[in-house]
Amino acid sequence: MKKSSAILAVAALVSSTAMVNAETLKWARAGDALTLDPHSQNEGPSHTMRHQMYEPLIIRDTSGAFVPTLATDWAPSADNPNVWVFNLRKGVKFHDGADFTAEDVVFSFERAKQPNSDMKELIGSITAVRAVDDHTVEIETDGPNPILPSNLTNLFMMDKGWTEANNTVNVQDFEGGEITYATTNVNGTGAYKLVSREPDVKTVMVRNEEYWGRNDFPMEVSEIIYTPIQNAATRVAALLSGEVNFLQDMPVQDLARVDSADGLMVKQAPQNRVIFFGMNQGADDIEADNVEGKNPLADVRVRKAMSMAINRDAIRQVVMRGQSQPAGMIAPPFVNGWTAAMDGESSTDLDGAKALMAEAGYGDGFSIRLDCPNDRYINDEAICQAAVGMLGQIGITVNLDAIPKAQHFPKITDGKTDFYMLGWGVPTYDSEYIFNFLVHGRESDIGTWNGTGFNNADLNATIKSLASNTDLDARNADIASIWRVVQDEQLYIPIHHQVLNWGMADNVGIEVDPEDQPRVKFFTMK
Amino acid sequence: MLPFILKRVFQSILVLVITGAIAFSMFTFVGDPIDNMLGQERTMEDVERLRAQLGLDKPIPVQYFKFLNEAAQGNFGVSYRQGREVSEIIMERAPATLELAALSAVFAVVMGIALGVFTAIRRDGFAAHFIMSASLIGVSLPTFLIGILLIYLFSVELGWLPSFGRGEVVEIGGWTTGFLTESGRKALILPAITLGLYQMTLIMRLVRSEMLEVLRQDYIRFARARGLSERVINFRHALKNTMVPVITVIGLQLGAIIAFAIITETVFQWPGLGLLFINAIQFVDIPVMAAYLMMISVMFVVINLLVDILYAFIDPRLRVSAK
């Protein structure tokens, strides 16, 4: 493929001068897709790349609402509560001209359930996928699953015939270093086709003129040139110099500069990610503090006082340069279960915090270590530094230990930290996902990111029942009651919702997606 | 002579094994690769399964021995981040780094010698003073800052040269080259200057001081007395005699150019080995880190070995004392 890239580049150059309305999207972000195999590596930049060329049954729009894609409509079956029925779009063709049918959907689900697939956890509840006719599919789960469609928005459809003909039915063995036909070639139904790809260097795609939605979407970009640029200053320089006209992963300190530059603008939207601190309240004594024989974090008054000492507006203005929304709960605003009231529950009250500390018997304060990543979230280390000063005002001496994410996250999952920063995004847009990972007591396959030691049997049972509760009103009532406990217990100290920024040339028209997943078919080029 | 060489080769292998052992014991401090490889939805079972599959549950000496054993057979394992053979990735990335290093070396040598000679001959001129002061910037400013400054001047403000990447490359028999296309040549300019600037100032200052030394020698004075032209004196007699130490330094610095291309490659998103290594550190991609570090240490050890052997050829006293 690389051998022909020079020839193709020349060809693309010739054709782009020949076409009248040729518009090239020169797109850069920090990282590259890890592989093109649609069912390997469940990871942001990899999904972003696939979304241009492959399609799932359903996608979400920028508000988080479902948008029919390869499925036109879907509903739970009237006969069997464990079954969802999906009606497929007719007249859809893969890039090689083959028709998209129910057989391909069945095949793709089976492929995504293979042991090497990274998507298998998301569809773990599915027991069978059946083709009823060419354009109807039934998906059966091991119990009623009211939020099944939420798990399908990154599950891409492949062509059974192409995959079999090219001997790539098995998902690549990524850890084993396997290269298959599907890791370097693409045959999707998507709006763009792969032209050439050099991993970590450049990927070129062209518009699929046969796309089923060619007239339904703007699709004004005729060619995409995607180049990862790792260094933040170089990335911004490339945008300023016009070498790229669309940029993800904008550094916060350069926003004003890009926005004020001629011909460039920055667009922003709240991101599907909330930043917070976790505290180990479960242990009798903790290792990271200077209090012997007891655990100050086990006292809810101490946790409340710590939350009250954090001045979220100051963090927003000083550390984040306005690029955050102060948070009162650890759910992003798009998520089912989020309420404005609960998200506004955090307030700064130093006198109240000091009174609570005194009441809990820690009027003289204590000292504790805060573990913080320094390369994961926007200004993560600076936020922690600000928190150190704020907690110092109520007598808590915080020793900050800021380290790279590859060392920080194992501390949380292995229970080696008592006070830590974590950020969380919710791909399913439902609170159940948060509860499963952050609120349910820690077990081998649930509560894996709950480093607080919180483990409430009743709450655990309620969380587990959410998965199969088809009475949506009752389910939402349960979600609200679980949130009430999380809030009252001050299980976490919410800091803020991250804001996402995309930089672009003035002629590029696109709204920011909260999941950081631009889909080029929606782009306009004036 | 042969016992001397054998002894040096044996010492070199020992150095390599120790370097590798140090590198391997450092990897545990970089972090846990499993965390980057599996998404946030992973279960503890997934973690344990992958850890066992990669052999990361074994003690460090066992992991190191396995690496040495496989590396000796030319197998450097599979990149955790890219899921491809490390040797294949390194072969794919090497041309970018080698082309950049070669051009930087040419730039450093040609400009370094020319400016060194110039500042030695016109040692009191305004231009020479200016060059000497400016060269202080070259040695004192960090590479990434020079790179960013060049990008802002030539890419953002003037728009003459690209700020990142290699441009269009042409593949010839497994080697990709940027020399054959206009965009490829343009893309080489800024990174090559950034990478070579330090070496250039170093060579320039060395040539200058050596030249000043030589120009004071009697034979230069006699040459002048014989009525030879200044050009012949400066270039045929003086410069030639300054070259011995300069060539030694150039040889050693060439290794440094390849090894320290890391920062330049990161700033310019140059798809070479340095960028590969930085990515590997951030992802805790142990096979890539191990292969890169071993490769660089082999390179330095080989260069030093050759230099030692050359010295022995030049200076018989070393041969005698080695016995």
Image (tube, coloured by chain):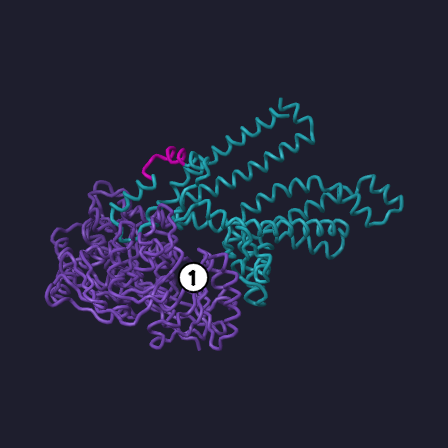
Q: Residue B62: within the magenta?
A: yes
State the residue position of label 1. Answer: A29
Q: Is residue B262 left or right of residue B219?
A: left
Give the drawing colour for chain B.
cyan
Taking B30 as reference, is B165 left or right?
right
Q: Position of residue B41 (x, y in %)?
A: 26, 53
Q: Quadrant of residue B146?
A: bottom right
Q: Is residue A259 above or below residue B115?
A: below
Residue B13 position within the rendered picture, expressed as x and y whole percent measured from the top left: 51, 31
- Which of the pair A293/B224 is nearer the observer? B224
- Above or below, A15 relative to B121: below
Residue nearest the viewer, comparing A434 with A151: A151
Residue B56 in view of the camera = yes
Of residues A161 and A176, which is closer to you in this image? A161
What color was chain A assigned in the picture? purple
Residue A357 counted in the magenta span: no
Instruction: Look at the magenta stretch and give its main secondary structure.
Output: helix
Task: Where is residue B185? Give x, y as percent.
Answer: 59, 59
Closer to the camera in the image, A455 or A368: A455
Q: Which region is colored magenta?
A: B56-66
Q: Is residue B80 left or right of residue B197?
A: left
| Quadrant of image for the C terminus of chain A | bottom left
- Chain letter, disc 1 residue: A
Mark 1 neighbour density, 10 Å: few (under 14) some (14–19) many (20 or more): many
